[in-house]
Image (cartoon, rainbow, N blue to C red):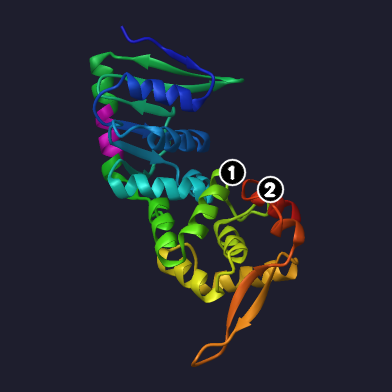
Amino acid sequence: MASNLIEDNLTQLLRTAVDRSSGDLWVVDPTQRAIRAVIDVANGDDGAIPAIRMLADEQALKSTFDDFLVASRTADLIDTGTLSVRTLTEETANSLLVAEGEVFAIVTTGDRVAALTTDDGSFVNTTKAGCERRWEAADSFRLRTPPISEVRTTLGAEIGDDIRADFDTVLDSLDAARGDGNGLDEVTISLLIAARNDVLLYDISKWGEDVGIASKATFSRTKTQLEDTGLITTEKVPIDVGRPRLRLQLADDGLAGADIDEFATVAAERL
């Protein structure tokens, strides 16, 4: 008989459910917290995780993927075929995790989270059939964020290994990277790290547009905002033909002197 699961958080719960399940997994109508937990579990696995099909509310997906850290790791999972995401077209009664021989209904209460479980064959088969029907009727969710592996690889190849190392360290120090006024987004991070390494605006913005982070115009607007706040400055660099290009440099002494592990915290405080 299937046993219920009780854990301290959604990530632990999902990891336990994945470990004891076989075959592909369905995740149906997850909350934003659950979407993040699925991505955490899938990225933290050693490669043995089964294929996951996620049916989720479109607004919940958009809000979750406003965070570059989550969206770029999700893009990696989609790119490798580990994860497929479609949008729900109808309401559901519960958030579900459906495995090969079990159905888990996810319940959160206080500081704990539980998965009420059944392995009744008839119920499992009926639930899976419902998932299949909804999946066929659903639209694929279009994630515009590039895979983080591609971002890192191209940054090192096109700009330099030093800036890639700084970029990785800053991302690792953040809990989120979203442009909602409460922290640093991916364009701001890219420009500040470029300024720390004296990179040309043309080079970092071209890389950012080519890899799919943002347009050159967005990079230019954000550069102007960072200049206005006194975090960066630019130096004109003559070229053989055309207008001089701009070299990005840090203008804030506190930021320029910050250790890379504290760079994001200092930048966020200045902003």
Residue lying furthest top: 1
| Residue 144 is at least partly visible in this image | no
Quarter where residue 193 is shown: bottom right
Judging from the image, what secondary structure is the residue with disc 1 in? loop
Left or right, 60 with reference to 50: right
Left or right, 239 with reference to 148: right
Judging from the image, what secondary structure is the residue with disc 2 in? helix
Q: Please say if 165 is above or below 214.
A: above
Left or right, 111 with reference to 242: right
The residue under the point 31% across, 31% down is 49
Q: Give the residue type at disc 2.
A: Thr
Q: Which residue is mark 2?
A: 265
131 within the magenta span: yes
The residue under the point 50% across, 43% down is 60
The answer to the question of whether label 2 and label 1 lie on touching residues, with beta carbons closer than 8 A, is yes
The residue under the point 39% across, 27% down is 96
| Residue 162 is at least partly visible in this image | yes
- Quarter of the image that includes the C terminus: bottom right
Q: Which residue is mark 1?
A: 173
Across and down, in percent, residue 38 comes to 42, 34
Q: Please say if 58 is above or below 13.
A: below
Across and down, in percent, residue 80 comes to 29, 46
Please provide the residue range marked out in magenta: 128-134
Crowd class of label 2 (few under 14; some 14 to 19; many from 20; radius 10 Å): some
**Near-viewer residue (107 or 69):** 69
Q: Give the residue type at disc 1.
A: Ser
The residue under the point 52% across, 35% down is 33
- Quarter of the image that includes the N terminus: top left
